[in-house]
């Protein structure tokens, strides 16, 4: 089962920051948090991932709470093309050096003009 | 970099026939690949994990004799849906773990839409 819970849907105004929350209260100390998004009928697209520290790349920022029980994905300036389903995923280890991604239900983000 | 190519992008087959879907890592070697299934308006469900040169590990409830997975090389994994029925119609997506490139982690193919008539 997925180890994350997310709101089913969110709206955001174009040009504003989109903040997508995720709860992962049962996360273990060595499990990473990954964020992907999926636009209709396409494969998921990697956004960002992290373990403990906040992370930032050209697409987004990931803020992880100190107790690691929740995180927030921030899209700093949402555009209409950011409308998608966003998945917060805790990678489940299957060996010492690899893991599998178990998807939850995700958040449908609608960016509005 | 780290591109996964999935083929075909869509396929229609008759009930009772078998369909093979290919997943190739184009510019990296993938020792581990993953197969997912997605029904309309639902999330991705992990079906199995395939490891190069060994048997696939199936998730609970997934029929291994119906969904045959072969990972014979470091760049190719195949999923064969045997004796397909209309309830097998779905969007099938593969993924590969990219070693040595933490910026990617896991990259996904573009998916295969299977329709069984």
Image (cartoon, rainbow, N blue to C red):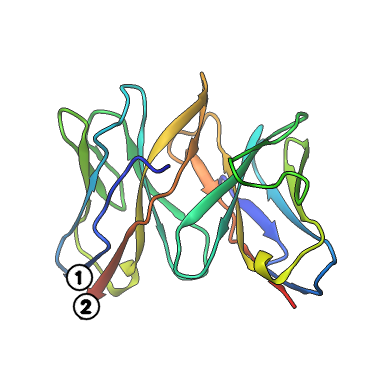
Lateral position of residue B46 relative to residue B16, left or right: left
Q: Where is residue A55 in the image (x, y as percent from the top left)?
A: 26, 38
Q: In which quarter of the image is residue B81?
A: bottom right
Q: Are marks 1 and 2 in contact (CB under 8 Å)?
A: yes
Q: Nearer the viewer, residue B51 or A48?
A: B51
**Is residue A63 visible in this depiction of the protein?**
no
- The residue shown at (24%, 35%) is A25
Q: Is residue B46 above or below residue B9?
A: above
Q: Is residue B96 above or below residue B36?
A: above
Q: Position of residue A57 (x, y in %)?
A: 30, 45
Q: Where is residue A4 in the image (x, y as percent from the top left)?
A: 31, 44
Q: What element carries label 2?
A: strand
Mark 1 closeness class: few <14, some 14–19, many ≥20 residues within 10 Å = few
Q: In which quarter of the image is residue A8?
A: bottom left
Q: Nearer the viewer, mark 1 or mark 2?
A: 1
Give me the chain letter of mark 1.
Answer: A
Give me the chain letter of mark 2.
Answer: A
Q: The C terminus of chain A is located in which quarter?
A: bottom left
Q: Which of marks 1 and 2 is nearer the N terminus?
A: 1
Q: Position of residue A75 (x, y in %)?
A: 23, 57
- The residue shown at (51%, 18%) is A96
Residue of label 2 = A112
Lateral position of residue A21 relative to residue A36, left or right: left
Residue of label 1 = A11
Tell me, for residue A20, which label it has, or none: none
Q: In this view, does A14 lie above or below B61?
A: below
């Amino acid at each position: 089962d997925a180890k994350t819970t997310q709101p089913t849907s969110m709206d955001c105004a174009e040009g504003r920051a989109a903040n997508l929350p995720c709860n992962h209260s049962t996360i273990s100390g060595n499990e990473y948090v990954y964020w992907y998004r999926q636009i209709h009928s396409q494969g998921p697209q990697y956004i960002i991932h992290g373990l403990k520290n906040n992370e930032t790349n050209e697409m987004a920022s990931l803020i992880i709470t100190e107790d690691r029980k929740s995180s927030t994905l921030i899209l700093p300036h949402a555009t209409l093309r950011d409308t998608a389903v966003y998945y917060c995923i805790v990678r489940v280890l299957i060996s010492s050096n690899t893991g599998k991604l178990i998807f939850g239900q995700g958040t449908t983000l609608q960016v509005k003009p | 970099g780290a591109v996964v190519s999935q083929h075909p992008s869509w396929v229609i087959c008759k009930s009772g026939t078998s369909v093979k879907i290919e997943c190739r890592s184009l510019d990296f070697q993938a020792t581990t690949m993953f197969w997912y299934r997605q029904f309309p308006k639902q999330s991705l469900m992990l079906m199995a994990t395939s490891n190069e040169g060994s048997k696939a590990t199936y998730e609970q409830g997934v029929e291994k004799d119906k969904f045959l997975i072969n990972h014979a090389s470091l760049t190719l994994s195949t999923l064969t849906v045997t004796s397909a029925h209309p309830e097998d119609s779905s969007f099938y997506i593969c993924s590969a773990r990219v070693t040595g490139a933490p910026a990617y982690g896991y990259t996904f193919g573009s998916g295969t839409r299977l329709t069984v008539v």
